[in-house]
Amino acid sequence: MILAVLQARMSSTRLPGKVLMPILRQPMIVRQIERVARSRRIDRLVVATSDQPGDDVLADAVRKEGIAVHRGPLDNVLERFIGALDAHPADHVVRLTADCPLADPDLIDATIDLHLSTGADYASNSPDGAAFPKGLDVEVITAEGLRRAARQADSQEAREHVTWDVWNNPLQWKIAWLPAEPGQDAIRWTVDRPDDYAFVATVYDHLYPANRHFTSDDIKAFVAKRPDLANYGGDRRG
């Protein structure tokens, strides 16, 4: 059983409320869920948000789409993940973040396949220096590995960043990295700022009506034809 946990909150410091900002008349998180749902390897998707009143509207929007929601402490994301796992038992957990409306389902599946085939405690597609575009990050960890990380969490960083213990103690974990073309991590597809949102909205406006299943290659081909988007907001976009 493979459980995907999509962490989300309304109180983003750089772009508050971004997860519900509209993309083609739907909240951004709903567009991301559409893409994640195309994964062939994920068995269940749960959105993990906080138990604060400010996230009530987010929980309502997600439940309206028939997606399970788990709520927990705002400042302890790791505890939210453990709570989601307790509520929806699984063997492996996929960590996703709700600022990635261009998520790539094939890349999610490739990372899961790597995790399973290598027997790793933890697998990811974002090694230093050879990552995929920002906004396509995928992390997969065994359920026992996630519980181990929670037991060992002794700092606010560990509680906020979920896999902090893995990253900072690599010799204590069996880790697998999905190979990527060097330099791809310079491409920015995540949404943290108004210009990021404008870029993603433009991608959807042009690609989604013709093909709801547009791919990462389709995005790169589109940007290649649009010099005005190549470095939109000061970051490389394709």
Image: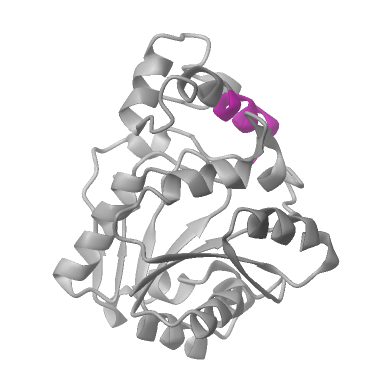
Quadrant containing the N terminus is bottom left
How many numbered circles does the render carry? 0
Counting from the top left corner in percent of width and height, residue 45 is at 48, 63
Of all residues shown, which one is farthest toward the bottom? 151
Residue shown at the point (60%, 23%) measured from the top left: 233
Say if 106 sits above or below 62 in the image: above
Residue shown at the point (59%, 39%) measured from the top left: 191
Counting from the top left corner in percent of width and height, residue 101 is at 52, 41
- Residue 199, quarter of the rendered image: top right
Residue shown at the point (32%, 35%) measured from the top left: 183
Is residue 84 visible in this depiction of the protein?
Answer: yes
Say if 31 sits above or below 140 in the image: above
Colour setup of the view: one colour
From the viewer's side, name the closer residue of 34 and 159.
Answer: 34
Of all residues shown, which one is farthest toward the left? 117
From the viewer's side, name the closer residue of 161 and 31.
Answer: 31
- Whether residue 198 is in magenta: the answer is yes
Residues shaded magenta: 192-201
- Whether residue 10 is in magenta: the answer is no
* Dominant secondary structure (helix, strand or loop) of the stretch shown in magenta: helix
From the viewer's side, name the closer residue of 197 and 179.
Answer: 197
Counting from the top left corner in percent of width and height, residue 190 is at 53, 40
Residue shown at the point (50%, 17%) measured from the top left: 206
Quadrant containing the C terminus is top left
In the image, is 23 to the left or to the right of 81? right
Counting from the top left corner in percent of width and height, residue 48 is at 60, 67
Say if 15 sits above or below 217 in the image: below
- Residue 136, quarter of the rendered image: top left
Is residue 129 visible in this depiction of the protein?
Answer: no
